[in-house]
Amino acid sequence: MAVYTQVSAEALEEFLLRYDVGELVSAKGIAEGVENSNYLVDTTQGRFILTLYEKRVEADDLPYFMALLDHLADRGNPVPPAIKDRTGEAIQTLEGRPACLIRFLPGVSVSHPTAAQAEAAGAAMGRMHASLTDFTLVRDNSMGVRTWQPLFDRCGRSLDDMADNLHAEAGAMVDRVVRGWQGDRFPQGTIHADLFPDNVLMRGSDVTGLIDFYFACSDARIYDLAVMHTAWSFDASGTTHHPAIGEALIRGYHRTLPLSDEERAALPGFAAGACIRFFLSRAWDWLNTPADAMVTRKDPLAYWRRLKIYDPGFVRDFKSLA
């Protein structure tokens, strides 16, 4: 979440007239995240999230995301579907951007998850994947393996401004991971593709919300778990690895959607791919985020450091969980 597009109180008041949600009380921009503009909106009838979709989210993809959230909510998953206006429409336009008013979910995202919280989050992902086995819509992974080499090329030599010789080292790693990718060999489905701790809301050790599905797509389910592993089992800087957290994630997932031995063995390779994906997207954002955007940029090197953890010794740690 972030704020790129400013919304005036007058425009927001007029926008809310389309809905049966009461009158505007207050609105506050949310700085976390990097993808869309988000506001926390309080009305006389409750609390909501207003999202304006920026350039990385294609307007033509929004019906897919809305259908996905409705599908998950109908099956009891803790997700925030968009609220429909008085005419039954969920997707609107505000300040020249596609926009939705979204149900607010209680809970907080944890910065330092415990093993119990990680296990609950892994189980929630497993239930989500199981709920999506009959979801028929398909969307290509907009940040999948086919995009990594072109994104690296666009970042170019500017990577060396972040660390000495980073361009050459990252280029070699991108080439190796892309050439060895085996995503098509594993069970496919609809995945979240971005289930970081800040996209999971919790009360204690209970999951109360899974949010921000705007990278959701069709891909290997094990890749989704790998993304989660890289995000949850390290500190924010990527320098400290917490194996117990990663083990708890896998344990929780396996409890709700069992993993095959082949999936377990392949998880470190998919985690390396996840590190490449987020290193590159963060690097691009770091180099190209407008100076006046109300957004918290994330350190690309935090994912470069994580990448170095997924070595042969760490593969043995995964196999021991079978």
Image (spheres, rainbow, N blue to C red):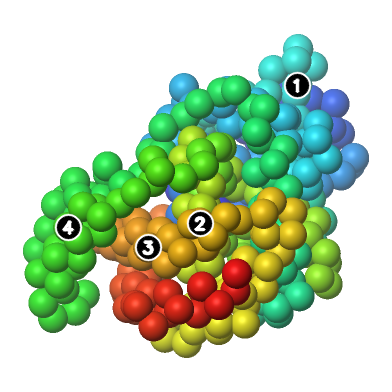
Dot 4 or dot 1: first in sequence order is: 1
Q: Secondary structure at mark 4?
A: helix
Q: CA distance from mark 4 to mark 1?
A: 47 Å
Dot 3 or dot 1: first in sequence order is: 1
Q: Position of residue 311 (x, y in %)?
A: 34, 77
Residue 306 in sight in this render: no
User: Residue 269, labelled with which disc?
Assistant: 3
Q: Are marks 3 and 2 in contact (CB under 8 Å)?
A: no
Q: Secondary structure at mark 1?
A: loop
Q: Secondary structure at mark 3?
A: helix
Reply above or below: 321 against 226.
below
- Identify residue type, mark 3: Gly
- Identify residue type, mark 4: Asp
In the picture of the structure, the residue carrying the numbered disc 4 is 175
Dot 1 or dot 2: first in sequence order is: 1
Dot 3 or dot 4: first in sequence order is: 4
Dot 3 or dot 2: first in sequence order is: 2
Q: Nearer the viewer, mark 3 or mark 1?
A: 3
Q: Nearer the viewer, mark 3 or mark 4?
A: 3
At 46% from the left edge and 40% from the top edge, which residue is drawn? 219
At 25% from the left edge and 55% from the top edge, which residue is drawn? 180
- Asked where in the image residue 280 lies, by quadrant, the reply is bottom left
In the picture of the structure, the residue carrying the numbered disc 1 is 85
Q: CA distance from mark 2 to mark 4?
A: 23 Å
Residue 224 in sight in this render: yes
Q: Position of residue 287 (x, y in %)?
A: 25, 60
Q: Nearer the viewer, residue 198 or 254?
A: 254
- Identify residue type, mark 1: Asp
- The C terminus lies in which quarter of the figure? bottom right
